[in-house]
Amino acid sequence: MFRRREPVPFAFLAEADRFRSNVTPPPPERSSVSQIAGRWLLGLTIVAALVGSLVIGMPALSQNQPPQGPQSQASQGR
C-alpha cells in the first residue's frame, strides 16, 4: 500500500521536500522615481529607434519607383 522511498546518501536531501520555512522573505525594495523614469526613458528610446528605422527604411522597401540615374542604351533595348 505505502511504498518506502529509496535511501538517499545525504539525509538533508531526503528531508528537503518536507522542510517548510517559517521565515518570510523581506519585501522587495520599491523603485525610486529616478529608476522608474530611467526605465520609461529607455523604453521610449527603443520604441523611437524602431519607429525611426522603419520610417527611414520604408522608401528603400517600396517597389513602385522607377529606377533612377542614367540608363545605358543596352537597358533601353537599342
Image (cartoon, grey):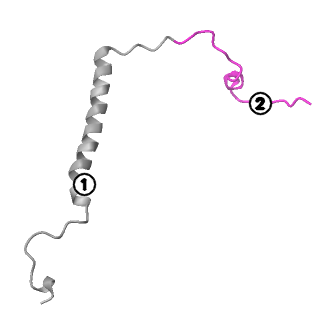
3 or 78: nearer the viewer: 78
Predominant SS of the magenta segment:
loop
Identify the residue at image location x=28%, y=17%.
Answer: 34
| The C terminus - image quarter | bottom left
Residue 5: x percent and y percent?
Answer: 80, 30
Residue 45 numbered mark, or none: none
The amino acid on which the numbered mark 2 sits, given as a three-letter code, is Pro
42 or 56: nearer the viewer: 56
Identify the residue at image location x=31%, y=32%.
Answer: 43
Residue 7 numbered mark, or none: 2
Neighbor class of circle 1 (other Cα within 10 Å; few <14, some 14-19, many 20+) is few
Task: Classify residue 3 as left or right of residue 32.
Answer: right
Identify the residue at image location x=20%, y=50%.
Answer: 56
Q: Which residues are magenta?
A: 1-25
Above or below: residue 62 compared with residue 26: below
Residue 58 numbered mark, or none: 1
The amino acid on which the numbered mark 1 sits, given as a three-letter code, is Met
Residue 53: x percent and y percent?
Answer: 24, 47
Q: Quadrant of residue 14?
A: top right
